[in-house]
Image (cartoon, grey):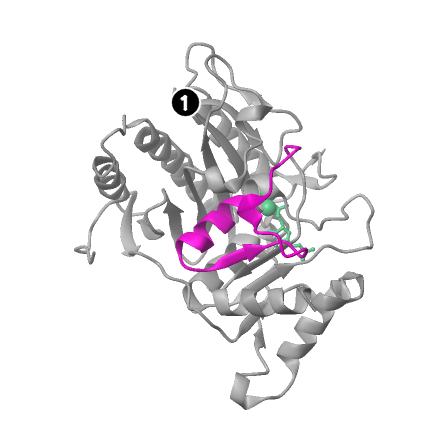
């Protein structure tokens, strides 16, 4: 449905709430609080060159990665706001080893998983970064939530999305009725609908992968990438390579222009046999979005990401995600 320009995100959220008779408004409230956190982070990111949030915090996280100051700022902003929102019973963040409790008496019916600042290695070089979030309905009965409320397959996600802090700040999310994109007008502090009902192009001419890891990939993936680079005009090859190194930025570009992103499992590091990206707050939310937009998301065993049953908060997964036609091609190579 084509909407008039100037539709605010809260209008969109309430409209979709009204479409669900049994809605209590809790999901709307949760998203609204999350969006406030996103605006606060956006203001900080856009000041990053000036304020002293550039650089590392001197800490390392469970992933063994240096924690950037902006990682920490974004993480604390979301944790503090959501802990007292009253809509969630438990949270997990890329930056926290264990589950994060909510304030006593403020337990709600959803659980939240998030990557507060994705692409943080790009903060100091002014490349687009983002916040990724995913929301499940709780499975425990009441009180503080547990890991069980978070370790659910992506197929049962209630909502997911990201905020990309780039040339403009955009919010892209879905509550299961398609994917909608909003652009922040910083002069009024509002997200306005700019990309209604986003559909990812069926086929593309872009592939996005860190080819520096080529020799660590499974042979089928190597064959696929080599195939894309062969010259064959009839099948639109060679594809163009686009790799930013920020998952949110690479994903967002593919969502708009079409393309296939791959972070394959690599045999180099037995500690990360499944690849680098995390299932709960990177692969699952983006897989939910891409399927809502008509695309596909698999791991490099050919398994649908949304069918994977998580067993650990920070478990990693290989990821092949993007235009349906391109992911179908990869699936063909994986099947030999
Ligand atoms: P994060 O900054 O949240 O740790 O995520 C970084 C991820 C992801 O954004 C990106 O796709 C990937 O790291 C890039 O990894 P390589 O530098 O190994 O290509
Ligand atoms: Mn990330
Ligand atoms: Mn991160």
Is residue 56 something one can see in this rendering?
A: yes
148 in relation to 208, above or below: above
Residue on which the image places disc 1: 109
* Residue 87 place in picture, x, y as percent: 39, 23
Q: Residue at x 61, y 52 (%)?
A: 303
Residue 196 image-quadrant placement: bottom left
Point out the image quarter for the C terminus: bottom right
Number of dots carrying numbers: 1
* Residue 287 place in picture, x, y as percent: 51, 50
Start and end of the magenta stretch?
284-313
Q: Is residue 161 left or right of residue 100?
A: left
310 inside magenta stretch = yes
Query: Badge 1: few (under 14), some or many (20 or more) residues near its Cα, within 10 Å?
Result: many
Residue 223 image-quadrant placement: bottom right
Is residue 52 something one can see in this rendering?
A: no
Q: Is residue 127 left or right of residue 191?
A: right
* Residue 220 place in picture, x, y as percent: 72, 67
- Of all residues, the one furthest to the left in this rendering is 4
Residue 319 image-quadrant placement: bottom right
Camera-side residue of 330 and 168: 330
Point out the image quarter for the N terminus: bottom left
């Amino acid at each position: 449905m084509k909407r008039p320009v100037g539709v605010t995100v809260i209008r969109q959220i309430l409209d979709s709430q009204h479409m669900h008779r049994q809605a209590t408004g809790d999901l709307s409230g949760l998203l609204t609080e999350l969006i406030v956190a996103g605006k606060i982070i956006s203001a900080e990111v856009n000041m990053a060159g000036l304020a002293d949030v550039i650089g590392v915090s001197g800490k390392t996280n469970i992933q063994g990665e240096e924690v950037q100051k902006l990682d920490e700022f974004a993480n604390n902003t979301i944790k503090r706001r959501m802990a007292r929102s009253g809509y969630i019973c438990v949270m997990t963040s890329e930056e926290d080893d264990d589950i994060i409790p909510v304030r006593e008496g403020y337990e709600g019916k959803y659980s939240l998983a998030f990557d507060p600042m994705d692409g943080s290695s790009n903060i100091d070089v002014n490349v687009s970064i983002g916040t990724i979030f995913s929301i499940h309905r709780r499975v425990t009965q009441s009180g503080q939530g547990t890991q069980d409320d978070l370790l659910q397959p992506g197929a049962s996600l209630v909502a997911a999305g990201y905020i990309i802090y780039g040339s403009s700040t955009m919010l892209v999310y879905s509550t299961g009725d398609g994917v909608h994109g909003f652009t922040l007008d910083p002069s009024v502090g509002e997200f306005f609908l700019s990309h209604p009902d986003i559909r990812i192009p069926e086929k593309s001419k872009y592939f996005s992968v860190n080819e520096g890891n080529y020799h660590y990939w499974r042979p089928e993936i190597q064959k696929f990438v080599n195939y894309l680079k062969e010259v064959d005009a009839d099948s639109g090859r060679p594809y163009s390579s686009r790799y930013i190194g920020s998952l949110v930025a690479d994903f967002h570009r593919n969502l708009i222009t079409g393309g296939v992103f791959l972070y394959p499992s690599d045999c180099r590091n037995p500690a990360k046999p499944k690849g680098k990206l995390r299932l709960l707050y990177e692969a699952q939310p983006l897989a939910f979005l891409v399927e809502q937009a008509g695309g596909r998301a698999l791991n490099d065993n050919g398994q649908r990401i949304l069918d994977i049953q998580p067993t650990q908060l920070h478990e990693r997964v290989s990821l092949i995600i993007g235009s349906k036609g391109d992911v179908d091609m990869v699936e063909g190579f994986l099947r030999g």
